[in-house]
Image (cartoon, helix red, strand yellow):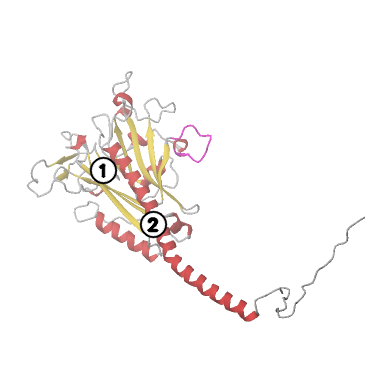
């Protein structure tokens, strides 16, 4: 027989209070509005406190990005520049970027230097051809410092010619006092086409992104800026900024009688190519973080300023370009420089 459940109600006894069943409780509308108001005020206070922290964090990330880019690039260049070598068969050249464009490179900044040299960077001191130049693609927002690196046994023949055993008088073996053809004649468009993933002939790579400007200042033995070869009035006409194979002399312990510490020579039957390196180089980079480039602002071109002696006025040039960037609304730029003493230039 099934048991039937019964509901028992509380029974009050004389002298005892009546027990009531619990009732469901709820917040009133005023209480809810008060709670939401308090919560909103707390959120505003919290967001206001976090905003400065967020800005500081973002700014720190940008600063770290620009510092890492510049430091890595300058350290690599200094390490490869220090052991640079020249002799009657090799050159050290600072050329305007448009010369590299004529050799097949794309998007080279025209008024920025292209730097080429030879250095014993291979195994057992084997020579390597090294170079740096500034790449700029405004449509894609790419502003990159590029590096050229060529091994002697390059299958495409991009390594500069060093010797011709069959013809000792081969003119291609001779460095020019006025041009960089000893390097440039060996290169073509394929040598600079790193965008093609299937191109196995490329000899270039990206060293750093976000580099808006790149300058090279050469110094003589007495620490003075070397005038650009292109500014000389007596030397055979050249568009180069510096050429180790040019006709020139450097003062060693004190200036010449005319007060100069470096003079270019006219070409005569007695003139000899100097085949000398600068004593020091000052490398300067101007970098910016990715956020500044993404905003799509127009990046101005570099304008070089020379002093009365025909050498690059580096300080004025950098300040002038920084002003151009600020006028374009680009304020978060950083300038980095390093001095490199060339072992073979002393």
State the image coordinates of residue 189 (x, y, percent, origin top left). Answer: 46, 38
Q: CA distance from mark 1 to mark 2?
A: 39 Å
State the image coordinates of residue 15 (x, y, percent, origin top left). Answer: 71, 80
Q: Which mark is residue 221?
A: none
Q: Which mark is residue 60?
A: 2
Left or right: residue 186 versus residue 75 is: right
Residue 201 is one of the magenta-drawn residues: yes
Q: Is residue 112 depicted above or below 78 in this figure?
A: below
Q: Mostly what secondary structure, the magenta segment?
A: loop
Q: Is residue 245 depicted above or below 155 in this figure?
A: below
Q: Earlier in the sequence, mark 1 or mark 2?
A: 2
Residue that carries the numbered disc 1 in the rendered image: 242
Left or right: residue 242 versus residue 209 is: left
Q: Quadrant of the N terminus?
A: bottom right
Question: For the residue labelled by badge 2, is the local secondary structure a helix, a strand or a loop?
Answer: helix
Q: Which residues, given as a range, are shown in magenta? A: 192-202
**Would residue 82 be visible to someone looking at this image?**
yes
The extreme right residue here reads 1
């Amino acid at each position: 027989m099934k048991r039937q459940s019964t509901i028992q109600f509380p029974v009050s006894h004389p002298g005892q209070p009546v027990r009531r069943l619990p009732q469901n409780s709820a917040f009133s509308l005023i209480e809810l509005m008060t709670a939401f108001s308090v919560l909103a005020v707390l959120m505003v206070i919290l967001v206001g406190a976090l905003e400065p922290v967020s800005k500081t964090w973002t700014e720190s990330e940008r600063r770290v990005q620009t510092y890492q880019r510049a430091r890595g690039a300058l350290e690599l260049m200094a390490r490869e520049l220090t052991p640079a070598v020249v002799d009657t068969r090799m050159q050290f050249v600072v050329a305007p970027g448009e010369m590299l464009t004529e050799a097949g490179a794309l998007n080279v900044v025209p008024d920025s230097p292209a730097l080429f040299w030879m250095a014993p960077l291979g195994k057992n001191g084997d020579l390597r051809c090294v170079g740096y130049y500034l790449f700029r693609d405004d449509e894609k927002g790419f502003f990159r410092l590029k590096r050229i690196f060529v091994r002697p046994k390059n299958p495409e023949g991009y390594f500069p010619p060093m010797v011709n055993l069959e013809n000792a008088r081969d003119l291609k073996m001779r460095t020019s006092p006025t041009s960089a053809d000893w390097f440039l004649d060996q290169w073509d468009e394929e040598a600079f086409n790193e965008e093609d993933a299937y191109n196995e002939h490329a000899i270039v790579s990206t060293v750093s992104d976000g580099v808006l400007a790149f300058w090279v200042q050469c110094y003589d033995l007495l620490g003075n800026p070397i005038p650009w070869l292109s500014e000389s009035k007596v030397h055979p006409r050249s568009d180069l900024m510096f050429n180790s194979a040019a006709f020139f002399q450097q003062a060693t312990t004190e200036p010449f009688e005319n007060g100069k510490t470096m003079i270019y020579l006219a070409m005569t039957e007695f003139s000899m190519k100097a085949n000398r390196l600068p004593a020091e180089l000052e490398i300067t980079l101007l970098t910016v973080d990715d956020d500044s480039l993404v905003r799509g602002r127009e990046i101005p071109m570099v304008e070089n300023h020379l002093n009365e002696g025909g050498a690059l006025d580096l300080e004025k040039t950098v300040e002038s370009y920084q002003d151009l960037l600020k006028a374009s609304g680009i304020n978060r730029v950083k300038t980095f420089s390093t001095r490199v003493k060339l072992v073979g230039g002393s």
